[in-house]
Amino acid sequence: MNADPRTRLAELGLDLPKVSPPKGAYIPAVLSGNLLFVSGQVPMQDGEVVETGLVGADIAPERAAQLARQCALAALAAADSIIGIERVRRTVRVTGYVASATDFAGQAAVVDGASQLLGELFGDAGRHARTSVGVPCLPLGAPVEIELLLEVEA
């Protein structure tokens, strides 16, 4: 990792958002050994989804990629609330779900918004395995949801 993640966030002009309270019977993240499993995050602000709809119909793919980036920041905020972002050693896996119009096949480009942020923040330690999945609907009508698996220092 090149720099302290908080310093790198500041260099990128970014802040971690407040952790949104779960909208169901789960917690934002679970630490198991040196792995932190971060629950899926949808693009929220002040406890509400910022945009709803299907990518490729209601929401442009470029905007959806920005929302995926916002989801990744929210996931990092959840990680920070559990272990402190300084303890992240690497991003292991990203799973991205994209609420897609029936003819939309650009899910990977949407999830790139999250992947690129992790690379900008953690450098080589931000590179990860990934799955991008198109789905007909996501919780609260969100267009994108991002979950992370992070390796952390003991």
Image (tube, grey):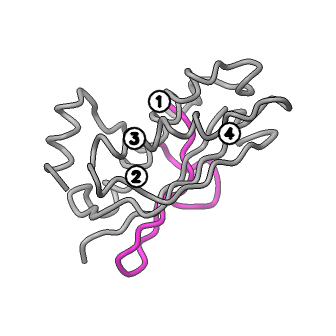
The mark lying in front, picked from 3 and 4, is 4
Q: Are marks 3 and 2 in contact (CB under 8 Å)?
A: no
Amino acid of disc 4: Val
Q: Residues within 10 Å of mark 4 (few under 14, many from 20)?
A: many
Q: Residues within 10 Å of mark 2 (few under 14, many from 20)?
A: many
Relative placement, left or right, of 47 versus 125 is right
Please tell me which of labels 3 and 4 falls first in the chain.
3
Q: Are marks 1 and 3 in contact (CB under 8 Å)?
A: no
Which image quadrant: the C terminus? bottom left
* Start-end of magenta stretch: 20-44
Amino acid of disc 2: Ala
The mark lying in front, picked from 3 and 2, is 3
Instruction: Name the residue that disc number 3 marks.
Output: 73
Q: Are marks 1 and 4 in contact (CB under 8 Å)?
A: no
Q: Which mark is residue 78?
A: 2
Please tell me which of labels 1 and 3 falls first in the chain.
1
Q: Residue furthest bottom?
A: 33
Q: Residues within 10 Å of mark 1 (few under 14, many from 20)?
A: few
Q: Indicate whether residue 26 is drawn in magenta.
A: yes
* Foreground residue among 66 and 112: 112
Q: Residue at coordinates 52% horizontally, 33% vertically from top-left?
A: 44
